[in-house]
Image: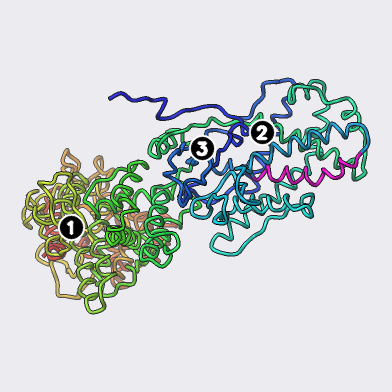
Amino acid sequence: MTIDVEKAFRANPRSVLQFLQVPGQGCYIPAYQREYRWDKENVNRLFEDALHGLSLLPEREETISFLGTIIAIHDTQYVTVKPHFRNEMPRPVMTIIDGQQRISTFILLFVAIHNLLATCLPSVEKDDEEGSAWLLEEIQKMMAELRDCFILDKRSGKALNRYYPRLIRSFDDVWSSKPEARYSSAIARLIWDYLKHIENEETEAKQFRPSEPDGEKASTHKNVAAVFRHMNKRLRDLVQPQEEMPSLIEHALKAGFGEALFGFEVPSEVAERLRKDDETTTGKRFRLAFAAIIFAHYLQRRMAFTVVESEGEDDAFDMFEALNTTGEPLTAFETFRPRVIDAEGLEDYQSTPSHADMLRTEKYVDRYAKDASKLQRTTSELLVAFALAETGQKLGKKLNEQRRYLRAQYGDPDDKTRTEFRRGFVKRLGDVSDLMSTSWDPAETLNPSFGGLSNIDEPAKVAFEFLRGLKHTVTIPPLSRFFGAALSADPEERLQKSVAFADAIKASAAFTAIWRGAFGTTSGIDAVYRDVMLSGDGQAALAARPFSGNPSTKRKSALDIALYKRVLCDALEKAGISEKGSWSGKVETSLLAKHATEVAKFLLIASAHDVEPDLKNPGLVVSGRKGVHPTLTLDAWNLLSPMQVEHIAPQQGASTDWPADLYDERELFQTLGNLTLLHRDHNIVVSNHPQPKKMASYRALASRTPEAFEAAREEARKLGYDLPERSEAILAEATHARLLIPLVECPSDWDGEFVRQRSRRLAEIAWDRLRPWLD
């Protein structure tokens, strides 16, 4: 099959005037495009660009100001326009994918210049001095050109309905030459109100003031009005000297300027009059109108885009991502939202379940609306998790891939037989969003609320903190499935569903800790979670709609906590770590401090739960009675998790008196048995000292009484261990470090054999604490 590249897209340079005055053309902003966001600073930059370009004339006659790329869909079939009256549409329609902020700004600016010239016109018409006839003709020509940039004359329809705003927005506006016409978006409303203003003989020559209606989009109307007012101020300042530059009029009177800009010199009588210091109202308006015409002429003919036209939406977005002209592409969710509105119907949308569920997602992603890169990253991570939860598919992070996924899975908005399916799809997206918003996102949820679910036990809360601290986002898809079921459960079932959600959290944490504890790295673990969602046990899977792409391997969806645990346990068995002995043997040599510090921390906390020193084997611990020292509680986690993972035999200890077998090729100093937890300040005190001095510091930190503390300090002094003043102060203020108690009785030789023994013992206790979470 051959591809006609020229048909797929066309790229042509166009001046602003050439683009906006295409005969019969209307510009259309899809619903997924953001509202008008430009502010005074953006407008100031546009003015400075134009004034700089004008300052280069006549020395550089070919001067233009390039404004980047406009990407649009040449929509001959009106596929992208919602709603519309087909026989009432402009021809052609250009659906703007990138560039609506710039196009909207030029239209506002042309309205402002038109209004300024309209207010000057009566004065120039009455002016009988030399030069006024020429200026009057130029004003009339420019006003006609400007009007044609923001108003399309359809030449049919009653009264004002024969005119269309050149730019409208999806859903808010409808082109029509009949009373059905509606223009309520901020830009289209301003154009329409201004059209009524100039078509009224009583107001056509007066200053136009945009309305600022209340309502859902009041802030956008307010911003547009503020920008319009600022444009008016900047236009009236054109006759004033600029920073380190003469006024625009002074510059325009240079020899050759008129020839460069207009193609002819400014008439001598006009130039002479402009040189006069005429402070009358007539004189001021003469100068202001002349400056506005020069400025408008440059804006229209010397400011230009490259207009890239595509026949289809996918191609347009591909080009947008490749060109990335503004650095702020629309997220896949933003382009998905209007599809949902279309499916539910604009009039009914706000009363539908889809609206409530979409708000859950909007609430989550919109918290990053002011940070474009964070917004993109957050939305991308959300959709990757959702795709795995929904269909078991591994979705990439490319915007177009994510857009296509949402569009394909949601289906045809016009297919009314799939309404309930589509609402379920949007609900499940909301479930993932709620889980991330209320619980996972560390920036906003220091204390996860789990969407208001109760009966989330303490170990589950600790397990969740471990998973999100590990940034183990691949666990979000299975967790969101149980979370969503609990959120939507009837009151009599909510307790049971909440417990299942808590069990899923603990099962995920246990599996992750066991897998990573054995292998250190993340190798293979993501594939296990994806397999849980897509394949499950071969008969049923956890995804809402498992989709492998192969009809012969189709599996049913089963939201079953027993299934989830069983598939995870099967993965441990396949990896050869389903028994305590085999797993603890792996942990003995796993370089956790090197590859998985957060996993090491979690295993240290789990292995400290309800333990006591082993009196028969000094330096080790044994399980104690329930409640003797709970660490798998949220309070204990909040106390212990900020601590640092500390190497007992230091990382740089190979050349000291620490045993050499800790530093051979096995790197046993990086394993669990050589690790403990210490506060950051305590680590400063302990440092990388030889073993006797380090153990003396541990004894001081582990002391239960002031007497024991002083005895440990005296022991350190006898060893020649005099601390700097800062370290003495830290040690004096240090709280009791219970985790260090077993270490103070450790053997004199902290060697490879003892470290391996300690690794195994800690792993066995951690197994006893965590493995039941998978039963």
Element assignment for label 2 = helix
Q: CA–CA distance between discs 3 and 1?
A: 48 Å
Quadrant that contains the C terminus: bottom left
Sequence order check: which comes first, mark 2 or mark 1? 2
Residue 482 x %, y %: 23, 64
- Amino acid type, callout 1: Leu
Rendered residue at 66%/33% (across/down): 300
Q: CA–CA distance between discs 3 and 2?
A: 21 Å
Quadrant that contains the N terminus: top left
Element assignment for label 1 = loop
The residue beneath circle 2 is 300
The residue beneath circle 3 is 92
Q: CA–CA distance between discs 2 and 1?
A: 59 Å
Element assignment for label 3 = loop
Disc 1 crowd rating (10 Å Cα; few below 14, some 14-19, many 20+) is many
Residue 120 can be seen in this image:
yes
The residue beneath circle 1 is 542
**Quadrant assignment, res 774:** bottom left
